[in-house]
Amino acid sequence: MIKNTALFICISISSVACTNVDKKAIGPKFGSENKTDGYFLEKLALDKPEQFKELSNKKWFYSYEVTSESKKTLEINSCKKLSEALEEGYSSSNYREQKALIATNKICTTWSHMGELKPSKKSFIGALKHSLNLPNKMPPELSLVISNDDKRRLENASSWEEMGQIKNIEPVNDEQAVYYDKDGGIQRLTIMAYGDYNEDGVEDVVLHMANAVERGSYSSSYSYVITRLTADSKYSLIKKF
């Protein structure tokens, strides 16, 4: 009877409070915006960690040709082959293609980390929602850092908002939104997955950020693992890659 009462209270209040009442594990959750549509013939519906692990060997619908210092060539058509080629010093002679290779490797790394997510014992995250207020709660490492001055400011910044001063947001869907800062920075933030990344029992979040600038050729992308240790605290960074 006590267990049933606790469950009723849990449903009646919120998902965050629920994690403190219900002792069952919180399974990993994966968003539909998983970036697979850029590498395979169609977007894949993946909802289990092991499915993301399997992407390492899954062939893309295209391939890259890379070259070693000894002029040996290699065809790259999967995450595993790309990782091995980069470790062995292979690269593309084309600047744009080399940038694409590095960005692809980051997506592959993100999938690999998503494949390691474990069930959580508790969560202080709830449903993460895009809004103009979100950058105030996010770690400063999510900001667009280009210049040496940006790097110096980052050392003392306490939030993404402090660094970027976001002026506008353009929601794409529940998982993705584009953030515009006062200096012309454009950042597309995607919520990729929820789960326990560092095995401390607390739910974490995997994010992906694609960066660009207005009227410029600059572009970069990064993935992050963040967490929240209390219901009222800001999010903190666990890993950036």
Image (cartoon, rainbow, N blue to C red):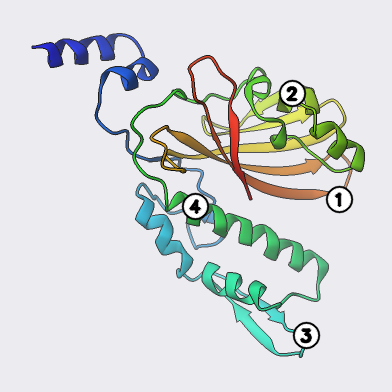
The 10 Å Cα crowd at callout 3, few under 14, some 14 to 19, many 20 or more, is: few
Q: Nearer the viewer, residue 78 or 233?
A: 233
Q: Residue 225: where, in percent of width, then height?
A: 56, 41
Q: Which residue is mark 3?
A: 69
Task: Say which residue appears at 59% left-offset and 21% top-offset.
Answer: 234
Report, in whole angstroms, how far the alpha carbon at label 3 lies from the one at label 2: 43 Å
**Eye-nearest disc, 1 or 2:** 2
Q: Residue 233: where, in percent of width, then height?
A: 56, 18
Report, in whole angstroms, how far the alpha carbon at label 1 lies from the one at label 2: 23 Å
Mark 1 / mark 4, whichever is N-terminal: 4
Task: Say which residue appears at 42% left-offset and 37% top-offset.
Answer: 200
**Eye-nearest disc, 1 or 3:** 3
The 10 Å Cα crowd at callout 2, few under 14, some 14 to 19, many 20 or more, is: many
Mark 2 / mark 4, whichever is N-terminal: 4
Q: Nearer the viewer, residue 78 or 123?
A: 123
**Residue 146 figure quarter:** top right
Extreme left residue here?
Answer: 1
Amino acid of disc 1:
Ser
